Image (spheres, rainbow, N blue to C red):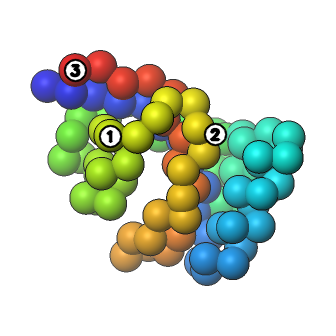
């Protein structure tokens, strides 16, 4: 079964998500940004979600995590929880 490791930042609105993405792409550290801005408890760990299998996260996450490029900041990804920036750090088939 496919597994992946990722980290994310959760914020309530798309504008904030885009602002943080621009900061990260400009050189701001992803983990530091997650600790400061993420509304998910994982923010305290730099947004680290650990390793998970397909189907363990919401479908919007799976779509990105199991298909898109590694070590790139993806998003905004809208889910029932808000807007996410996602970075896939590892993936195995």
Which dot, 3 or 2, sits closer to the camera? 3
**SS under mark 1:** loop
Tell whether label 2 touches label 3 (CB within 8 Å): no
**Residue 88: percent from the left, percent from the top?**
48, 35
Query: In the image, which disc is placed on residue 67?
Result: 1
Residue 60, located in which quarter of the rendered image?
bottom left
Q: Quadrant where the N terminus lies?
A: top left
Query: In the image, which disc is placed on residue 93?
Result: 3
The residue under label 2 is 45
Image-based side of 2 in relation to 48, left or right: left
What is the C-alpha distance between the residues marked 2 and 1?
24 Å
Q: Quadrant where the C terminus lies?
A: top left
Asked if residue 43 shows in the view, the reply is yes
Asked if residue 42 shows in the view, the reply is no
**Residue 53: percent from the left, percent from the top?**
24, 35
Image-based side of 24 in relation to 10, left or right: right
Please tell me which of labels 2 and 1 falls first in the chain. Answer: 2
Above or below, comparing residue 21 to residue 28 in the picture: below
For the view shown, which residue lies furthest in the top direction?
92
Identity of the residue drawn at 65% across and 60% down? 38
**Residue 29: percent from the left, percent from the top?**
80, 39
**SS under mark 2:** helix
What is the C-alpha distance between the residues marked 3 and 2?
26 Å
**SS under mark 3:** loop
Please tell me which of labels 3 and 1 falls first in the chain. Answer: 1
Around disc 3, counting alpha carbons within 10 Å, would you say few (fewer than 14), some (14 to 19), or many (20 or more)? few
Residue 68, located in which quarter of the rendered image?
top left
Which dot, 2 or 1, sits closer to the camera? 1
Identity of the residue drawn at 55% across and 64% down? 76
Which dot, 3 or 1, sits closer to the camera? 1
């Amino acid at each position: 079964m496919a597994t992946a490791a990722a980290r994310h930042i959760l914020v309530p609105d798309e504008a904030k998500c885009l602002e943080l993405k621009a900061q990260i792409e400009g050189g701001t550290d992803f983990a530091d940004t997650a600790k400061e801005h993420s509304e998910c408890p994982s923010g305290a760990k730099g947004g680290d979600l650990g390793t998970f299998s397909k189907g363990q996260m919401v479908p919007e996450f799976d779509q990105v995590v199991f298909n898109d490029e590694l070590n790139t900041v993806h998003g905004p990804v809208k889910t029932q929880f808000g807007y996410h920036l996602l970075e896939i750090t590892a993936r195995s088939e």
